[in-house]
Amino acid sequence: MNPAIQSLAAQRALEAAAAAQGMGLMRRAACAAADKVRALLPEPAPVTVLAGPGNNGGDALHLACELVRAGYPVTVVSPAPQQGDEAVAARARWDEISGHTDRELPAAAGALVVDGLFGIGLARAPSAPWDALIRAVNASDVPVLALDAPSGLDATRGTAPGEAIRARHTLTFLCLKAGLLTGDGPGLTGALEVAPLDVPPAMWPEAEGELNRPLLAPLARKANSHKGSYGTVCVVGGSPGMLGAALLAGRAALSLGAGKVHLATLDARLAVDPCHPELMIAPHTPTLPTHEVCAIGPGLGQSGDARAALAAALAGDVSLVVDADALNLVAADPVLAERLARRQAPAVLTPHPAEAARLLGLSTAEVQADRVGAARALARRFGQTVVLKGAGTLIARADGFYRVNASGNAALAAAGQGDVLSGAIAALIAQHLPPFDAACLGVYLHGLTGDLYRARQGYMLGLAASQSAADLTDIANALLLIHERNTV
Ligand SMILES: NC(=O)C1=CN([C@@H]2O[C@H](COP(=O)(O)OP(=O)(O)OC[C@H]3O[C@@H](n4cnc5c(N)ncnc54)[C@H](O)[C@@H]3O)[C@@H](O)[C@H]2O)[C@@H](O)CC1
Ligand SMILES: [K+]
């Protein structure tokens, strides 16, 4: 799981704390970037370094000095003076070493262009002279290494207000940013790496203890246990014609270790899943079987029975995973929305962008234009954990803290995957993970089924949701084995 990020504000608070302790993060960033350049160009070759006006530019100028010391021929392009003490000092160091900077991209930009124009401080669409420089870089066929974020990209939203640098590689500092994993972010188009700069986790202001916590520790099995030790999941859904969705959620819950799984279906025709006789299937009745967590929504439909089942679930005190049509019913009915918002027992909402848009009264495009904002708004609105699915799935907590998932790929863009995810999260809650952790880990493991598929296949076509449901078992067991090895 990638390092947690609360917001760019948390990163800036950490940077300020580091500066106060004289940790010299900028020099560390430059050294990490120099290592990356050496990895890309093992032999010294001409490198063009673009230096912007802020600290991203400062990183780039220190990098230029490191590269000259390592014997690389370096051209610095800096069309405007640096602002801020750290960036000005970096420029002075460069002037000391070379004393020459260009204002435009050289005709022959060399073997690599390093983009240090803007990082997390981009405030608006780059204007002159920056936009012309970005266009010139994108027009050249020289590979680009972007520092912290491709210049011109909004590091939170993943959108580009103007034209953004198209980077083949991005080395981001301290932690991942939501915008690198969503929208047009490089996490989807290029190679993305994090350089943590050896900052101790405790320095993160609000994510303290969140970083690298072994989320899956509660899943470790104890010899002296029985099926009740691993909880009971009840899936409520499967209205006529949509049984598959409920079956997928039930299978995923079994695959990820729930002790028992009931399937309360709105279609009485389904009596048994021949592939999974362990699934206890019965027609839904207002008095549900006893269970710790209920995944409601897969194939639920929006009939009167469906609404009644949702109202009963909301009125209960079990943990809920609210997905698909259950979310649509909430979006369409203020009474249900109020019940969900007032509910004391935990719930995890798992909307895709269109379902989030309905819940927020926005268009899907507006949700996608600010995914972090949408996820946090929903989490605050309902006082619950929200999983905003899509490239760079976000898991937001009611207090605004959020995580970005870095696993998965377009193989998961297929029917039924949302049902699998809701069953997976339900299984983790049933095994006593707190809802936010269950959502983070469920999203992460589910994403890994896409990564596993691409590793096996070499590409991303044709992953069936039932395959993902089955693969959750192998992936979780492999990670638990590693966890146990590391904790002996
Ligand atoms: N301060 C620290 O401790 C660290 C800072 N780091 C670097 O510092 C960066 C953040 O530095 P800054 O906050 O200075 O911001 P940036 O370096 O991202 O640049 C923004 C600067 O350009 C100006 N600007 C923003 N949008 C503009 C536009 N469209 N046209 C023209 N000018 C524009 C801003 O006024 C600001 O001065 C990070 O991305 C990272 O690269 C890293 O070295 C990590 C440590
Ligand atoms: K940059």
Image (cartoon, helix red, strand yellow):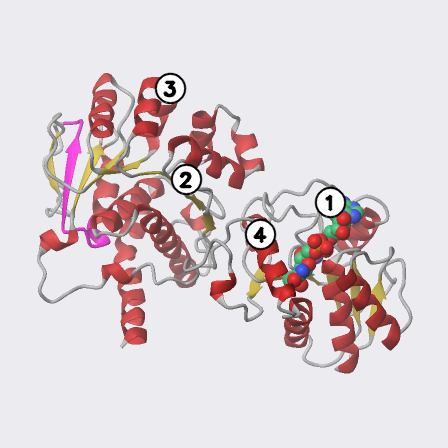
Amino acid carrying label 4: it is: Leu
Amino acid carrying label 3: it is: Ala
User: Quarter holding the N terminus?
Assistant: bottom left
* Residue 117 x, y percent position in the rendering: 76, 56
Please report the residue visible at 26 percent of the width from the left and 28 percent of the height from the top.
300
- Which-is-in-front pick, marks 3 and 1? 3
Which residue carries the number 4 mark? 180
Q: CA distance from mark 4 to mark 3?
A: 33 Å
- Which-is-in-front pick, marks 1 and 2? 2
Amino acid carrying label 2: it is: Ala
- Which-is-in-front pick, marks 1 and 4? 4
Please report the residue visible at 54 percent of the width from the left and 46 percent of the height from the top.
182
- Which-is-in-front pick, marks 3 and 2? 2
Q: Earlier in the sequence, mark 2 or mark 4?
A: 4
- The answer to which quarter of the image holds residue 325 is top left
Which residue carries the number 3 mark? 332
Amino acid carrying label 1: it is: Glu
The disc placed on residue 398 is 2
Q: Earlier in the sequence, mark 1 or mark 4?
A: 1
* Residue 318 x, y percent position in the rendering: 20, 37
